[in-house]
Amino acid sequence: MIGVRGPMSRLTFREKAGAVCWQKQRRDRYLAEGVPPVPHLDVKRAIVRPISRAQAEQVILKYEWLGTMSPTSLHFGIFYGNYCAGVTCVGFGASMAGAYHADQFGIGTGDLLTLARGACAHWAPSHSNSKLIGWTCRMVGARGKLMWATCDTDAGEIGTIYQACNFVYIGASDGVTRADREIVAPSGRVYNQRSIGGWAKTRKVRYESMKGALLDNGWSFQPGNPKHRYVYLLDRSDRGLVSRIESMRRPYPKRVRSAENGTAGTTSRGRCDSDPDAPTASTA
């Protein structure tokens, strides 16, 4: 069911996670499946290695909040024997956060990598996620200067894993910048505004033409939800970058449970960065 928007509300991806973050809810849901016949569950012996996009997708679609893949090109998995317990998906360049955020750090678009998706299976041993993210940063380190990651407050996330991996917290977004705003289809499906650029490119039209066509066909804009923003220095030899990141550092956010114990909010159909409900070619 699509949520009803009032003057001060916004449509959301799905029912908000509340006090218990989405991925924990997913892990709890699948506990009954048990543990696969892995040879061991020793995180020190686990191996992180590159995997295909298709392999990463299997985990992301099952466990990750958005439930879609992003235009990422580097994918990694943590393995216990032949069994994958978690994945990360990394993108870079104009198709990711670099197009909107690199200039605030004084680096080029291609130097800002984005940890766009990540999730672990319900049976993954403790510390699998921190080892996976730590090794992901090591393995992509030569490809850029800075790793960017965000946490979705609708999903109940505050970035505990990034705090454990020594990312720098630089504050929450306001939800109104071009990178954070959302566009709502007439059906109620919510997309990040960045999707417009992809649709425009596919149809070989200008961004503003695509945007205008959507508005003419009943689409509308809304603020995104605030997202916690974290960065990790991949290149510490750039002293200017190190100094800029330190000047942006803010105290880590902490989890606060509401008096209602995180009662969820409005429900709607899902936001997605792929386009199963994207505008048809005739829209533009």
Image (cartoon, grey):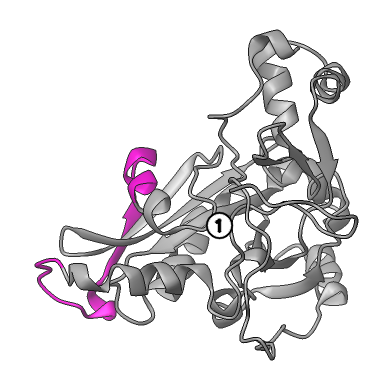
Q: Residue furthest bottom?
A: 259
The residue located at (49%, 63%) in the rendering is 138
Would you say 86 lies left or right of 82 here?
right
Residue 254 in the image: above or below residue 90: below
Q: Give the range drawn in magenta.
A: 36-58
* Nearer to me, 130 or 36: 36
Q: Quadrant of residue 197?
A: top right
How far from the left and from the top, in percent, is residue 271?
62, 45
The residue located at (58%, 79%) in the rendering is 160
- In the image, is residue 52 part of the stretch drawn in magenta? yes
How far from the left and from the top, in percent, is residue 212?
87, 21
- In the image, is residue 209 part of the stretch drawn in magenta? no
Residue 82 in the image: above or below residue 189: below
The residue located at (50%, 39%) in the rendering is 73
Residue 269 in the image: above or below residue 86: above
Badge 1 density bin: few <14, some 14–19, many ≥20, Cα 10 Å: some
Residue type at numbered disc 1: Gly
Would you say 62 lies left or right of 169 here?
left
* Nearer to me, 46 or 23: 23
Residue 236 visible? The answer is: no
Mark 1 falls on what kind of element?
helix
The residue located at (16%, 58%) in the rendering is 82
Residue 142 visible? The answer is: yes
How far from the left and from the top, in percent, is residue 231?
69, 66
Which residue is under mark 1? 141
